[in-house]
Amino acid sequence: VGVGGHVLHGGYGMSSRTHGLALDWVESLTVVLANASVVDCSANVRPSLFFAMLGAGSSFGITTEFRFRTYEAPEVVTWFSAALPWDGETAVEGLEELEVFTRYRMSPELNMRIMASANGSSLDGVFYGDRAGLDNALGPLLERVNGSIATAGTTGWIGGLEHFSESPMGLTVPKPYDKVSIISISSRRRADAAAARRILRQEPNADGTEWHIRREFCGLLVQRRVQRRSYMVVPIRPARRGTRRRLGGG
Ligand SMILES: Cc1cc2nc3c(=O)[nH]c(=O)nc-3n(C[C@H](O)[C@H](O)[C@H](O)COP(=O)(O)OP(=O)(O)OC[C@H]3O[C@@H](n4cnc5c(N)ncnc54)[C@H](O)[C@@H]3O)c2cc1C
């Protein structure tokens, strides 16, 4: 993806638990406004425009320059993939354990996401530190959700990026993987649990695609920030009733 849409509308990734969203690191922008004027904005210069650009940039102007703050890259990172032998029943309990872990116990050095489907479920992520640190940070959760680390590797910062880009650094074109998404809303807990059960039990669709659950565990601060920022961007369109019904939701 390009830096423009990604940064102007949030931008989470494999460092978001540790370092927040991409928009948190923008120092200042140069923007072309609708009246064709070219202006700079930052926390001190045109702060209202700066606030609006970071979250709803595409509605307010065209950014021609981004200036970022940077952080020191850690010398050692450990990427991992942990297998979760879940079925339709244990998945719901597991997802709830993950929710509590992320809220109250997750180390700030631990960044991860879950992919869960009828074909298998895994937690994938990166720990800013060595393997012993990863075991310490993730072990208590894995015990509770009956999971285990399937593969892991300790490397440098660039090695970690290469691992998640699934190729040596360079431009790759990913194949499309999401056709239809439903964003779960916390007030719909029971419907979400029903949908999770159904997804973990289903057969693949006729065209070979399958439903899966994907969730990034960025922590409460990022979650609040996304909620605060994203109300301006787009209203979340509810999934069609038929789609929800297929998944067992209300
Ligand atoms: C395969 C894939 C994986 C993804 N993974 C992640 C992920 O891990 N984390 C995450 O946060 N998001 C992820 N996304 C979402 C991605 O960040 C957004 O789709 C983002 O909008 C892409 O930015 P773009 O500039 O390439 O998109 P575009 O489609 O070019 O732009 C998106 C919107 O931003 C506007 N825009 C773009 N550039 C500018 C600019 N310079 N000034 C003003 N407006 C501009 C466009 O007008 C448009 O409205 C993923 C998307 C895909 C397709």
Image (cartoon, rainbow, N blue to C red):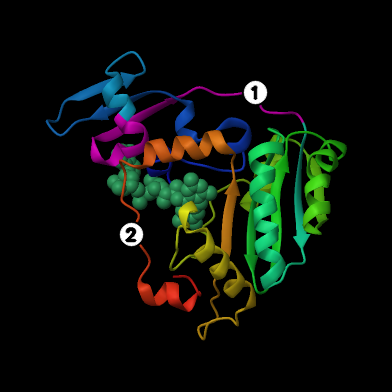
Quadrant in the rendering for residue 137: top right
- Figure quadrant of the C terminus: bottom left
Closer to the camera in the image, 68 or 12: 12
Secondary structure of residue under mark 1: loop
Residue at 43%, 43% (x, y): give it.
6
Q: Nearer the viewer, residue 6 or 122?
A: 122
Say which amino acid is labelled 1. Glu
Quadrant of res 203:
bottom right
Kindly report the distance in space between the C-alpha atoms of the residues bearing marks 1 and 2. Answer: 39 Å
Q: Which mark is residue 237?
A: 2
Name which residue type carries label 2.
Arg
For label 2, the SS is: loop
Residue placed at 44% from the left, 76% from the top?
245
The residue shown at (42%, 74%) is 243
Question: Height in image: 91 above or below 210?
Answer: above
32 part of magenta stretch: no
Q: Is residue 8 something one can see in this rendering?
A: no
Name which of mark 1 and mark 2 comes first in the sequence: 1
**Position of 104 relative to 239 (above/below):** above
Residue 123 spot, x, y in % from top left: 70, 55
Q: Note whether residue 172 is visible.
A: yes
Q: Furthest residue to the top?
A: 44
Q: Name the spot of residue 111 as percent of width and height, x first.
A: 66, 41
> Residue 219 is drawn in which quadrant?
top right
Q: Is residue 98 left or right of residue 137?
A: left
In this rendering, the label closer to the viewer, 1 or 2: 2
Task: Tell me the residue that label 1 is attached to.
Answer: 72
Q: For the magenta stretch, what is the residue range? A: 52-75
